Amino acid sequence: MSKKVFKLKKDQYLSDLEMKIIQNQSTFLVAPTGAGKTTYTMEELKAQYKLVIILVPTQAKVMELQNEYSVKGSLKSEYLFFCANENPDENIRKFNGVIVATYDKFEKIINLLSESQKKSALLVIDESHKIYAAGAFRDEALNPIIWHLQKRSIPSILLLTATKTDALFSQLNIGVDHEYVISHENPPSRHIKVTSLCNGDQYTAIAVIEKRVNQLLKASAHLPDKKCCKTMIVRVNSREKCENFKRYFEQRYKLKCIVVHSKTKGNKDVQEIFETQKIPTGVDIVFTTSIMDEAVNLNNPEIEIDSVFILGKQAHVEELVQFIGRLRLANVPCHILLHTGIPQSNVKPEQTHQKHLKKLNDFITRVNKIAEALASLAADYKFDLQDNENANIYDKVSRMNESFLDWFDCKLFTVYKSKSIQNIASLVSALYLMDTGYFYSSFEYMAWRIKQFLPNSKITFIEDTTATPHYIKEFFDEQKVNADKAYLESINPALKIFLEHFQNGLYKPKSLKEIAVKFVEHKQKDEDYIDDLALFTGGKVAYPDKVAKILNEIVYLAQNIGNLHDIQAILIQKKFNVVAKVADGYAKNEFVRHLVKQFYTYSPEKYLENRHRLNGLQASKLLCSTIKAVQKQTQLPMKSIIQANLIKGMRYDYESESYVIDNGKALNFIATYFEVKDRNKNKPERRYLEFEGIAIGGFEYLHLKAWQGQYITLKEPLMIDGRTYDAYTGKASIRKAKLEDVFTD
């Protein structure tokens, strides 16, 4: 690979370098934020190539570019934009110009292109670090891109980013012929202050931000509206916290706050930010999630922006640098507030980095061996598919992924072009999450990593003893109470939408799962379909955002839980996340399914009624026998995997020719999936599990029907607001009725 370094002088941009992206070659361009990558890709490259396909990570970025380039008169016909419900069609076979699309539209585009178009096109991957960063939740969109980049289906490739972590990108096995590294001759000196909140909790950052708010209010006391004289930007990696923080400063200080996240992108104020690439005048605080890391450039001058605050340890170093770089003109103080603290170290950061790299390499080597070994043999595995005798490759891969998820924290496999292949996007994103944790191992290492991207930055460290004031705690305690109350009050409205939306004189459901599938089918065509049902009901529901959230949860639960009473109970008890985890396990995890079958088949009364106890040694033996049985049944090469020490906490004893599993690991596994009390959890030598049932919550799981059915009591119809619904089909009564009313066809 050839490598060239370029320096941008003051007021110089990429377009001024007159770089040529070589045809039939793969080029990686690393350029800092504000170097003019957008202008270069959208305007300069179309002079070099008849067709330029630019893939970007977010809908917001597509909308930003569409707003900028679709209003330029004669240029309009030279650009096409695809995101959300806008999809390409065969007309692109005749198109010359620039196509901008989100990652998930790529496969539709490449399948429509002719071979001659592919040969003459340039494929541009914008924010290409996302290929290895976002695979935990976007693997279905990213794996086709990775596959085609590896195969060079489109021979001319340009990868773009401001932040490239070589150790992560190299794991994608994407060949690069040329690397261009661009930097500013005189880069801005970013001032970054890392604050360890020694006595802090999750709300102490509010007290720190509040101090700055009071300073700004004092400075602007002479102004007629008595607002902050500048805007603060706060990154919080939680939509709920963004909303709560906004509520706090609006109520206590009467400030104007905007929240930017995936659910507010349609709001007028948020759209204005994306379209104008500026924070509107008069906004005191912008609270945002990671959506703004790449979604928008902010061209506010320094006189309008006060400071940036980044809360918590969720952000990878690349995300921090990308977020800070959103400010194109304003160079303001950036505060990183860590309420869990961060140690200082005398160890050289380079040494720490080498240790971290070794851990990353050990993990990926371990996991790659398994993924490579198992993916090619997927067609040979034999699963006991209870309700699907003719298992296809998708069924098998889904079961393989779920069966190994607990032990590797990523999906090992995916199906592409009807074959099982390694799920590289998910595998490498697991490394990305590990690297995020390593980033915060010490202040010195953290500063060193930031300086790899921002060499001219000034990074300082302080310890702050601020504790959260009681009035802040009281406010957020009250918010939690209100949120819980709103959630509970939204359950029945969400259930009614679920049960009544599709029911009419012609359609009567046969099962709750059938109703759920209808919602899923509509959501596949319009990703906001379910949310919009709740959000556009006008005054019919008090908390449309909560109803939307619950409706999505109901759609999932109805595909896994057999009756309305259980679904309602899961929601009331706020057990959705727990049930979602175990429901997937009951459906597809072969080790869990084997244990379930054992418990329900042999002496079920001791688990259901007699509070059977299981200590660490017994749990280890039970899991060992389960692995043996699953290996025999499915032909998964578990013995080879454990012999190679590929799963931590599991090994093979050659003398006794048996598996050995750490007691704690076995207890943790069983406690996750079964209704037990975990006794003496913090005292390993005395720890044991006490069974209070088998299936979590005693709920009726569709995928346990063959074993659980005889222990389930049939449920009566469920009444909601005076109307009754069959507990199993969801079929509504014709008129408002009492519980004992008979359902009619």
Image: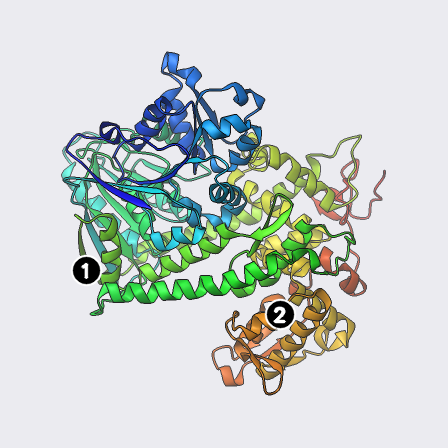
Q: Is residue 565 above or below residue 185?
A: below
Secondary structure beneath label 1: strand
Residue at the limit of the structure toward the bottom, as seen here: 655
Question: Can you give x and y, in whole percent of width and height, for residue 418 in the image?
Answer: 65, 45
Could you tell me if residue 433 is visible in this image?
A: yes
Q: Residue 326 occupies which quadrant of the picture?
A: top left
| Colouring of the image | rainbow
- Type of amino acid under label 2: Met
Q: Amino acid at mark 1?
A: Ile
Check the image and report above or below for 649 versus 392: below
**Label 1 crowd (10 A; few <14 / some 14-19 / many >=20):** few
Percent x, y for residue 381? Answer: 69, 60
Q: Is residue 176 above or below residue 632?
A: above
Q: Which residue is mark 2?
A: 638
**Going 40% across and 19% down the picture, which residue do you hit?**
70
- Dot 2, how many residues are within 10 Å of its Cα: few (below 14), some (14-19), or many (20+)? some
- Nearer the observer: mark 2 or 1; the answer is 2
**Residue situated in front as seen by the camera: 622 or 372:** 372
